[in-house]
């Protein structure tokens, strides 16, 4: 893989941070839910955000 430019690296860090924030918020929302279907929706969204963050972080390790 080619080296990332400074702009690409900055954008990647921004995306990783945004997905971490989403993960934290969705987890907090899920913990506050009473309705099991909504809780499941937030839990899945949190997991999706975490998975995407981890995939994006692989670009930093190359």
Image (tube, grey):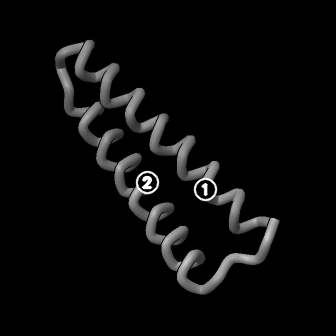
The residue nearer to you, when weighing 2 against 53, is 2
The residue nearer to you, when weighing 29 against 11, is 11
Rendered position, 21 above or below 11 = above
> At numbered mark 2, what does the secondary structure look like: helix, strand or loop?
helix
**Horizontal side, residue 61 vs residue 33: left or right:** right
Query: Which callout, 1 or 2, points at the residue further toward the start of the chain?
Result: 2
Find the distance from the CA under tag 1 to the CA under tag 2. 9 Å
Query: For the point 70% across and 68% down, which residue is it?
Result: 60
Query: For the point 29% across and 31% down, which residue is it?
Result: 30
**Horizontal side, residue 52 vs residue 29: left or right:** right
Rendered position, 13 above or below 35 = below
**Horizontal side, residue 4 vs residue 29: left or right:** right
Rendered location of residue 11, percent (x, y): 49, 72
Query: For the point 41% across and 38% down, which residue is it?
Result: 46
Rendered location of residue 5, percent (x, y): 64, 82
Rendered location of residue 44, percent (x, y): 41, 27
Rendered location of residue 24, percent (x, y): 37, 49
Q: Check contact, mark 1 vs mark 2: CB within 8 A.
A: yes
Mark drawn on residue 19: 2
Residue carrying label 1: 56
Q: Residues within 10 Å of mark 1 (few under 14, many from 20)?
A: some
């Amino acid at each position: 893989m080619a080296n990332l430019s400074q702009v690409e690296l900055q954008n990647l860090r921004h995306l990783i941070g945004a997905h971490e924030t989403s993960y934290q918020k969705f987890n907090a929302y899920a913990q506050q839910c009473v309705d099991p279907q909504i809780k499941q929706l937030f839990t899945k969204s949190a997991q999706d955000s975490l998975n995407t963050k981890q995939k994006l972080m692989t670009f930093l390790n190359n």
